[in-house]
């Protein structure tokens, strides 16, 4: 999100991860679970289950702590709401983001559907930016030519 809303992912991770040897956290993480979660290939429960590689010892992931911090720390970046509101009637406004199903919470909490003509994330499009396919799917859904987008 970090263009419209502040994304507290790092703070949420810090609250959620417990490790006997904090320096070992990186080598225990499953690098495939976040991209799969973002693209809607796995649900949140599977994301948590796969966050650390199978057999990793001395590490744990507390999804309740993660979600508590994540939800509390989202906020509009300074000036963004005002810019988006000023563009109403002057341009079509869309969110195009790499983000998992949590984007649906943000749509509601920040009334994104009232600010933008559409909100599309990797969760909806089933592919992540910067892959060309993400943008091809996006322009197909919104019905505009890629050359008309900023």
Image: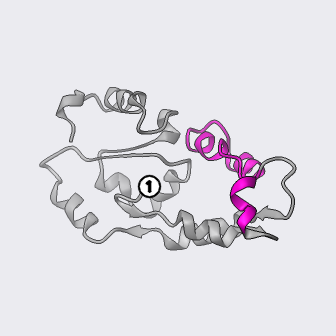
Give the colouring mode of the picture.
one colour
Residue stretch rendered in magenta on the structure: 23-52
Residue 66 appears left or right of 108? right
> Is residue 29 one of those drawn in magenta?
yes
- Secondary structure, mark 1, is helix
Q: Which quarter of the rendering shows the C terminus?
A: top left
User: Which residue is most to the left?
Assistant: 90
| Residue at screen point 46% across, 46% down | 98
Q: Which residue is mark 1?
A: 107
Residue 81, percent from left and from top: 27, 65
How many residues crowd mark 1 within 10 Å: few (<14), some (14–19), many (20+)?
some
Residue 69 appears left or right of 145? right
> Is residue 42 one of those drawn in magenta?
yes
In depth, the one of 124 and 78 nearer the eye is 78
Q: Is residue 137 above or below residue 6?
A: above
Q: Is residue 100 above or below residue 69?
A: above
Residue 41 appears left or right of 134? right
Residue 129, percent from left and from top: 43, 39
Q: Which quarter of the rendering shows the N terminus?
A: bottom left
Residue 59, percent from left and from top: 80, 63
């Amino acid at each position: 999100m970090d263009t419209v809303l502040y994304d507290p992912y790092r703070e949420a991770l810090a609250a959620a991860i417990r490790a006997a040897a904090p320096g070992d956290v990186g080598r225990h993480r499953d690098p495939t679970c976040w991209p799969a979660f973002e693209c809607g290939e796995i649900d949140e429960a599977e994301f948590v289950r796969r966050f650390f590689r199978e057999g990793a010892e001395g590490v744990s992931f507390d999804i309740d702590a993660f979600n508590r911090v994540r939800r509390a720390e989202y906020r509009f970046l300074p000036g963004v709401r005002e810019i988006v509101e000023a563009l109403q009637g002057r341009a079509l406004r869309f969110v195009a983001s790499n983000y998992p199903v949590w984007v649906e919470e943000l749509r509601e909490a920040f009334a994104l559907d009232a600010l933008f003509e559409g909100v599309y994330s990797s969760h909806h499009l089933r592919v992540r930016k910067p892959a060309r396919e993400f943008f091809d799917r996006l322009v197909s859904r919104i019905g505009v030519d890629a050359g008309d987008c900023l």
